[in-house]
Amino acid sequence: MLKYIIPLILFIVMAGFLAMGLKLDPREIPSPLIDKPAPDFALPVLTRPERTLSKTDLAGKVWLLNVWASWCVSCRQEHPVLNQLAQQHVTTIVGLNYKDDPTAAKQWLGQLGNPYNVSVMDQEGRTGIDYGVYGVPETFVIDKKGMIRYKHTGPVSIEDVQQIFLPLIARLQAEA
């Protein structure tokens, strides 16, 4: 009798873990960097590679870091939303062009519009690794003190902008 009960108990436990896993949203990947300082970087600007941008250049500003690439299908999906957000002039939007060909990236922005105040090149992917990027697109909200306050995995939608980004940006800009 015991030889039937142990496998039954193991099956029930495994089924319980499976049921819990099925309820998880794969887009909600927790980031250990939330409420921690954004990693430092100094990267060449996409349109002017002789110039670099660093995190310290953004000190005192609330800003978004949007990780994107011209080869990314989901980035194309979110791009019109970022263009609309940029037209509102509510915050600085920094593009992190991730593991991409600079020529292809410039052409892509030329065709689809450029929502970024500045876009930097992360051809090696090291800065993306520092930020814990799982894939593109990902978007980070960084406060005036350089702390990561939010991470969005996957394409940003209009609903995300209205329900998450704009209220958070407004709150962070109101803080001293």
Image: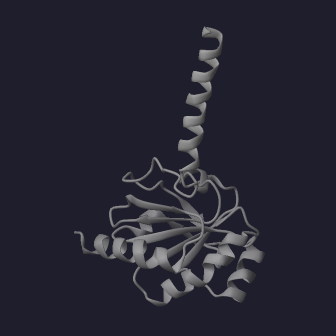
- The outermost residue toward the left is 176
Residue at the limit of the structure toward the top, as seen here: 2
Q: Is residue 112 above or below residue 173?
A: below
Task: Measuring from the top left, give residue 32's x and y in whole percent.
Answer: 46, 47
| Quadrant for the C terminus in the image | bottom left
The percent position of residue 12, horizontal first and vertical second, equals: 57, 29
For the N terminus, the quadrant is: top right
Foreground residue, 141 or 97?
Answer: 141
Give the image quarter of residue 3: top right
Say if residue 104 shows up in the picture: yes
Q: Is 15 placed left or right of 160 in the picture?
A: right
| Colour pattern of the rendering | one colour
Q: Answer left or right for 65 relative to 137.
A: left
Number of dots carrying numbers: 0
Residue 139 spot, x, y in % from top left: 52, 66
Give the image location of residue 94, x and y in percent. 52, 73
- Residue depicted at x 68% and y 83%: 109
26 shown above or below 67? above
Q: Nearer the viewer, residue 32 or 129?
A: 32
Q: Residue at x 36, y 65 (%)?
A: 143
Residues 26 and 23: in front is 23
- Determine the residue positioned at 41% across, 64% down: 142
The reply, left or right, for residue 165 in relation to residue 176 is right
Quadrant of residue 175 within the rendered picture = bottom left
Location of residue 149 with respect to 90 vertically, above or below: above
Indicate whether 41 appears above or below 21: below
